[in-house]
Amino acid sequence: MAKSALITGITGQDGSYLAEFLLSRGYKVYGLVRRSSSINNERISHLTGDITLLPGDLLDQTSLASAIRQSQPDEVYNLAAQSFVATSWNQPELTGQFTALGVTRLLEAIRTENPKIRFYQASSSEMFGSTPPPQNEQTPFHPRSPYGVSKLYGHFATINYRESYGMFACSGILFNHESPRRGLEFVTRKVSDAVAQIKLGLLDKMTIGNLDARRDWGFAGDYVRAMWMMLQQDRPDDYVIATGVSKSVRELVDTAFRVVDLDYRDYVTVDPSLLRPAEVDYLCGDSSYAKEKLNWSPDTDFEQLVQMMVEEDLERHRRHSYAREAGVR
Ligand code: NAP
Ligand code: F7E
């Protein structure tokens, strides 16, 4: 019989790629969607008819239990979160409610409905914070944001349910992963979108925050494959997923402008208001354990990722420009 999976955060970047991946493997896919006055299904609209959406919110225990009862999943992927680090300083309590306590609510719902369900928790390299690279499963945590602190709670809640109740609960410690579906507030997409607009003459300049921060950036499509692999093992465990290559924000900007043959120094200025109260300076993951146990490695490198993102944003803005012109005529 076909397996079934429930994805929280299915409307997000990773949720959309994971839904596609699981459908391609014959899964029945359910997605938890919170109520909103305007529909926000852009990333999964092409999957309408193939997936089943269920109402629910990480803030509401009853709705989580109900979604599990309705979907009867073999696997639950908890991708929902307040995921933007900068916002976590403005909304620290809400971030804790979604990103930390939301994990406990979901684990409790699974434990009481069916503790045999396999569970994936979307943990984050933000949990390493100020601990220097390379970071792997043995590296001590020192988060630097309310988001990182909340993710660390979720990480240990997952381990605790595994140890307390023998549940098949895994935590994927994923480093930054990006795509053309990345939210516009994250630095890679902010840059690819601005580069496309500048190239097309729709924008003159862009502002940026810390150019010296370093991140290990991979492609989201590669990373959702690792999530699924974790839940197919004989034993539950935690894994670091990363490319092992770290680049600065300056290198990101330089690479993106080079895709359209421009020099970033002519267009980019630093805006100190975009600096964070505490920064994560240097992330570079060591995913040799995932390579050994899951046989996982990424297919897409940094340059291919940046090129893909800039080209898709160019294409999107060109389409919108044509549509605008056609509308005027
Ligand atoms: P994303 O695009 O921001 O998506 C977040 C998802 O969570 C959206 O579907 C959002 O729904 C949903 N959500 C937020 N609050 C919710 C609530 N109270 N109840 C139900 N759903 C809620 O994030 P992403 O980049 O796909 O990341 C997926 C997960 O991996 C997140 O947990 C993130 O923290 C974690 N992570 C991401 C990265 C990365 O580099 N992308 C790295 C490590 C870990 P709406 O559409 O309604 O807002
Ligand atoms: O920032 C710097 C910023 O917001 C990356 C989330 O998916 O990955 C993501 O968190 C770096 C930081 O991602 C701007 O200060 C400079 O050093 O793209 P970001 P993030 O904070 O690393 C982790 C693994 C997650 O788990 C999170 O959910 O870029 N930076 N200038 C900027 N960042 C933004 N957003 N905007 C700027 O203008």
Image (tube, rainbow, N blue to C red):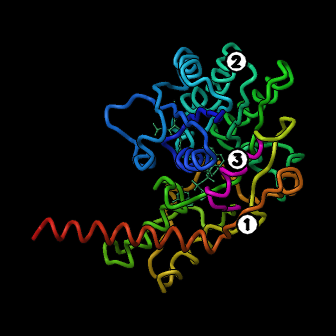
Q: Residue furthest left?
A: 329
- Residues at marks 2 and 3 touching, judged by CB atoms closer than 8 Å: no
Q: Kindly identify which residue carries mark 2.
A: 114
Residue located at (76% from left, 29% from top): 158
Q: Estimate the spatial distance between the alpha carbons at disc 1 and disc 3, rounded to whole Å.
A: 14 Å
Stretch in magenta: 216-230
Residue 193, position in %: x, y? 43, 66
Question: Which element type, helix, strand or loop, lies under badge 3?
Answer: helix
Mark 2 beta carbon near ligand 1 (under 8 Å): no
Q: Is residue 218 magenta?
A: yes
Which amino acid type is shown beneath numbered disc 3? Glu
Q: Main secondary structure of the magenta part?
A: helix
Q: Kindly identify which residue carries mark 3.
A: 126
Q: Nearer the viewer, residue 151 or 250?
A: 151
Which amino acid type is shown beneath numbered disc 2? Asn
Q: Neighbour class for label 2 at 10 Å: few (<14), some, many (≥20)?
A: some
| Residue 246: mark in rendering | 1
- Residue 187, placed above or below residue 167: below
Locate the C terminus and report the quarter of the image it occupies: bottom left
Residue located at (50% from left, 25% from top): 57
Residue 144, position in %: x, y? 70, 44
Q: Nearer the viewer, residue 150 or 155?
A: 155
Question: Which corner quadrant of the image does residue 324 belong to?
Answer: bottom left
- Residues at marks 1 and 2 touching, judged by CB atoms closer than 8 Å: no
- Residue 91, placed above or below residue 205: above
Question: Which element type, helix, strand or loop, lies under badge 1?
Answer: loop
Locate the N terminus and report the quarter of the image it occupies: top right
N-term-proximal mark, 1 vs 3: 3
Q: Tell me if 145 is positioned left or right of 34 in this view.
A: right
Q: Neighbour class for label 3 at 10 Å: few (<14), some, many (≥20)?
A: many
Residue located at (64% from left, 23% from top): 106
